[in-house]
Image: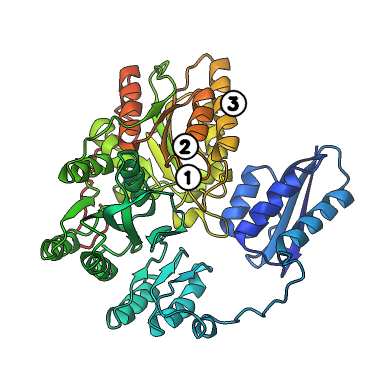
């Protein structure tokens, strides 16, 4: 094996394009590993963890081409990179049909757009404000998929929108369903009477998928961004979204879902929701509340029987005491799992911690430094997506963490989520199932049983195929559940039955409530 690292100064491609290039090059005969990425700090840490020696003088404006060769020559490998980059940037053929030059700005594009057109913004977060403001000033609703958008930009957009009756969905809005069309990461669900307002992408997906499993459809899902119910933003977009659904004749019930909100904002929004004609079910995550229970409350309100949520595979026992390792692509699913687990296990270390003293540094996560505590990581957090695609598209960081968890003798149980739908990986089990099987094999070779519990969020109509994904993961040895709350409780049963080290290095159980500012403490 030989490693080669080349720096291409001034070259640029977006993270999704570079992910496609890396996969294509890695599949070239004679190349065992390939990472083509912009030289952000996170990507440099990832390359270092993979064993590549990247020159120190790189900057985020440089593109790094890192190759590990078994048989191929460097010249052939670099040619494969050039060919993959060229293919990724080549416009789709239109069979000779005449083409029109695309609009060069959002404002010019909107001059030709229908009045009810929704604008989707997906650019690096620092550049999102002018594009989204063009949409707001033109009177169009806008969904901002971008993360890492400054708080000041969000406030400017939502204050401008409030005076125009425009809905700003986001920033960092990963999921929406508008007019029957899914935007971002969207599941295929049946139409129906339930509307969703969400400061939570994967929380929305969990609820609408469980509703679909129970035979209940969705009228709309309006994301508002994960910070909307913070004290700083004050629920500006949530009020607009609730009012939209209150006026929608196709909506008879509404669910408001959010990560833990600021208490005074939650109180004000609750009061506002009670003033509406449409009944609103509050699914605001907090100790003692989970998304499955709130979905079941909606079903009961609709006089629909609550089904037994689906499961696949065979449960097993952990072989000995150790820690719970949660590796998530969904931030709300990670939050929900931590809230449930903290009641049983005590402190949970995380990059989105329930209390500041439980924080895990990003470099600890990417380097795989052992942590003597129960841990849960949200790989979709902003700090882990700088210059990289979301982990629902690019599983690289989580797969590496799964391999390290398997090697760690203190790991008792691994808890994962898999989120299906449009926009997500076309076949997540294709990479994850072999990684699960390999992790369990490595543990077995060390004399351990490593249970892997998976919450699978999806519907039968999703493009990946719910049963296909579940069966593949179950065949690899995972126990798969449709409810994230039930998956978490099953994992907790395994950990506690094996004798969880409740008095870990982080034994002081903190207060995990939310402060008046909306920040956890």
Query: For the residue carrying disc 3, how many other residues have a C-alpha within 10 Å: few (<14), some (14-19), or many (20+)?
Result: some
The image quadrant that residue 321 belongs to is top left
Looking at the image, which is closer to me, 381 or 237? 237
Query: Residue 237: horizontal and vertical position, in percent?
Result: 29, 69
Residue 438 is marked as 3
Query: For the residue carrying disc 1, how many other residues have a C-alpha within 10 Å: few (<14), some (14-19), or many (20+)?
Result: some
Query: Residue 342: horizontal and vertical position, in percent?
Result: 27, 37
Q: CA distance from mark 3 to mark 2?
A: 22 Å
Q: Is residue 197 visible?
A: yes
Q: Which residue is depicted at the point 30% across and 52% down?
A: 192
Mark 2, residue position: 466
**Element at label 2:** helix
Mark 1, residue position: 462
The image quadrant that residue 216 belongs to is top left
Quarter of the image containing the N terminus? top right
Query: Residue 103: horizontal and vertical position, in percent?
Result: 60, 81
Q: Which residue is depicted at the point 52% across and 13% down?
A: 447
């Amino acid at each position: 094996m030989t490693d080669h690292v080349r720096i291409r100064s001034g070259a640029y491609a977006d993270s999704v394009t570079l992910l496609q290039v890396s996969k294509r090059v890695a599949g070239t005969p004679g190349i065992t590993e390939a990472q083509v990425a912009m030289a952000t700090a996170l990507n440099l840490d990832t390359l270092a963890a993979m064993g590549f020696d990247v020159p120190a003088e790189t900057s985020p404006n440089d593109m790094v081409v890192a190759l590990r060769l078994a048989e191929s020559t460097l010249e052939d490998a670099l040619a494969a990179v050039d060919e993959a980059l060229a293919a990724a940037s080549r416009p789709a053929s239109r069979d000779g049909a005449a083409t029109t030059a695309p609009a060069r700005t959002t404002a010019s594009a909107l001059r030709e757009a229908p009045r009810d057109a929704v604008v989707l913004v997906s650019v690096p977060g620092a550049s999102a404000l002018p594009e989204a403001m063009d949409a707001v000033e033109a009177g169009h609703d806008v969904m901002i998929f971008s993360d890492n958008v400054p708080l000041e930009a969000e406030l400017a957009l939502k204050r401008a929108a409030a005076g125009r009756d425009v809905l700003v969905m986001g920033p960092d809005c990963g999921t929406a369903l508008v007019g029957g069309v899914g935007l971002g990461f969207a599941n295929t669900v049946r139409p129906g009477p339930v509307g969703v307002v969400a400061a939570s992408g994967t929380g929305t997906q969990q609820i609408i998928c469980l509703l679909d499993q129970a035979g209940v459809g969705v009228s709309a899902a309006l994301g508002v961004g994960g910070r909307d119910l913070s004290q700083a933003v004050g629920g500006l977009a949530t009020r607009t979204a609730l009012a939209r659904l209150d006026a929608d004749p196709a909506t008879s019930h509404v669910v408001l879902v959010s990560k833990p909100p600021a208490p005074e904002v939650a109180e004000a929004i609750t009061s506002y929701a009670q003033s509406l004609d449409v009944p609103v079910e509050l699914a605001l995550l907090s100790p003692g509340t989970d998304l499955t229970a709130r979905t079941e409350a909606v079903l009961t309100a609709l006089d629909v029987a609550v089904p037994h949520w689906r499961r696949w595979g065979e449960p097993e026992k952990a072989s000995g005491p150790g820690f719970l390792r949660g590796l998530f692509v969904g931030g709300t699913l990670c939050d929900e799992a931590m809230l449930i687990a903290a009641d049983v296990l005590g402190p949970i270390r995380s990059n989105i911690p329930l209390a500041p003293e439980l924080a895990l540094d990003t470099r600890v996560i990417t380097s795989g430094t052992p942590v003597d505590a129960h841990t849960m990581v949200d790989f979709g957090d902003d700090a882990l997506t700088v210059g990289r695609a979301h982990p629902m598209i690019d599983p690289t960081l989580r797969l590496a963490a799964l391999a390290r968890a398997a090697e760690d003798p203190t790991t008792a149980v691994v808890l994962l989520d898999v989120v299906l739908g449009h926009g997500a990986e076309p076949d997540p089990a294709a990479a994850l199932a072999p990684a699960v099987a390999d992790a369990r094999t490595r543990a077995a070779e060390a004399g351990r049983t490593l249970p892997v519990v998976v919450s699978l969020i999806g519907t039968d109509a999703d493009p990946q195929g719910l049963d296909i994904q579940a069966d593949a993961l179950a065949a690899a040895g995972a126990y798969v559940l449709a409810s994230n709350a039930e998956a978490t409780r099953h994992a907790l049963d395994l950990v506690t039955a094996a004798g969880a080290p409740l008095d870990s290095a982080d034994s002081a159980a903190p207060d995990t409530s939310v402060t008046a500012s909306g920040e956890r403490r």
